[in-house]
Amino acid sequence: MLKIGMVGGAKSWHAKSFSEMFNGYDEFLARQHNFPLYKSRIEGARVTHIWDPDREAAELIARICSIENVVDDMEEMIGKIDGVIIADDTTMKHQKRAVPFLEAGLPTFVDKPLSPSIEEAEELVNIAKKHNAPFMSCSALRYAKEVEEFLAQKDDLGEILTGNSICSGDLIFYGIHAMEQLYVCIGPGIKSVQNVGEEGKDIVIINKNDGRKFVLTVYKEISYLFQMNLYGTKGWREVRVEDSDYFYSNMLKAFIRMVESKKPPFPPEETLEIIKTLVLARHSAQRGGERIYL
């Protein structure tokens, strides 16, 4: 049984969701404390250690999800776990906690977004490479069932020429979901971005090296959704991602395969390209819609 450490995010959604999927949960307590109630279970691993700056919040997850060890210092886990999850805590600073685990060579999943800084994202990837630490960071929508179903039928559309992807929220913190689902479908090779919207109402034209253009839309005030349209020479498809139980559990299974094999499920360069796209798209809006090259 693989031993997984959960670091941070105890007051947020993902640390609760991921702990439930590994360990199960006391349903009465979970309902009492407004925890998510996911049914998927990850075989062959469990969360054995948890740390959060808010110890009370960490202890609550431990009680609900039967996590044996609540540690006072996150680095206490090193040498006692097989892999670690650095959970998003909504501050976009969670990634800073990854450094000691990467330096220890531990398989490390850094929750989305890897960083709001291109330089910091690159540095984290470099640390992972320097210490041979298996590393992954992504939106769970990379592993969505609906995206998988589209990819299985992608050839039916012929050559995909253009498309769009939309979600609610902040461009970097939440827009990574819409960006990642689009990226998986159109592949790497982004040349430039141009944000013709504004902060909170971002409309980003994504120009690829092969000349194709796609549109990423992230609006803070629209209702919750992850929706994408892709248009090809033979047809088009709408993709609406709705099954969060599947995309979370599927991503965690990919993480466990990485812990076992010591091989990342996709190149870290893909994560860096996604982060660059989002960060430079924000810069573009701040510069009045200037086209910025990656």
Image (tube, grey):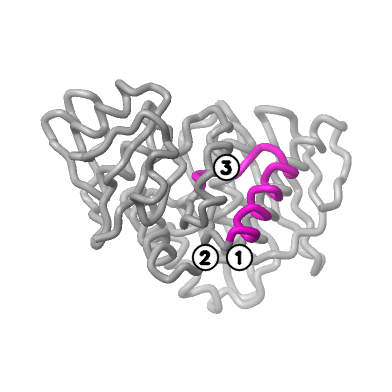
Kind of residue at badge 3: Pro
SS for dot 1: loop
Residue under numbered circle 3: 113
Can you name the residue that lies furthest to the left here?
28
Which percent across, then down, holds residue 105? 52, 57
121 sits left or right of 75 in the view: right
Query: Looking at the image, which is closer to me, 5 or 217?
Result: 5
Label 1: few (<14), some or many (≥20) within 10 Å?
Answer: few
Query: Looking at the image, which is closer to me, 145 or 35?
Result: 35
Which percent across, then down, holds residue 146? 42, 60
- Is there CB contact under 8 Å for labels 3 and 1? no
- Is there CB contact under 8 Å for labels 2 and 1? yes
Q: Residue at x 24, y 34 (%)?
A: 62
Residue under numbered circle 1: 267
Q: Which mark is residue 264?
A: 2
Nearer the N terminus, badge 3 or badge 2?
A: 3
SS for dot 3: loop
Real-space Cα separation, disc 2 to disc 1, in angstroms? 7 Å
Where 213 falls versus 178 (above or below)? below
In this view, the mark in front (3 or 2): 2
Nearer the N terminus, badge 3 or badge 1?
A: 3
Quadrant in the picture for residue 233:
bottom right
Query: Looking at the image, which is closer to me, 44 or 227?
Result: 44
Q: Residue at x 13, y 36 (%)?
A: 26
Which percent across, then down, holds residue 219? 61, 33
Which percent across, then down, holds residue 137? 54, 52
The residue range painted magenta reads: 110-131
Q: Residue at x 81, y 65 (%)?
A: 209
Query: Looking at the image, which is closer to me, 279 or 145?
Result: 279
Kind of residue at badge 1: Pro
Q: Residue at x 26, y 37 (%)?
A: 69
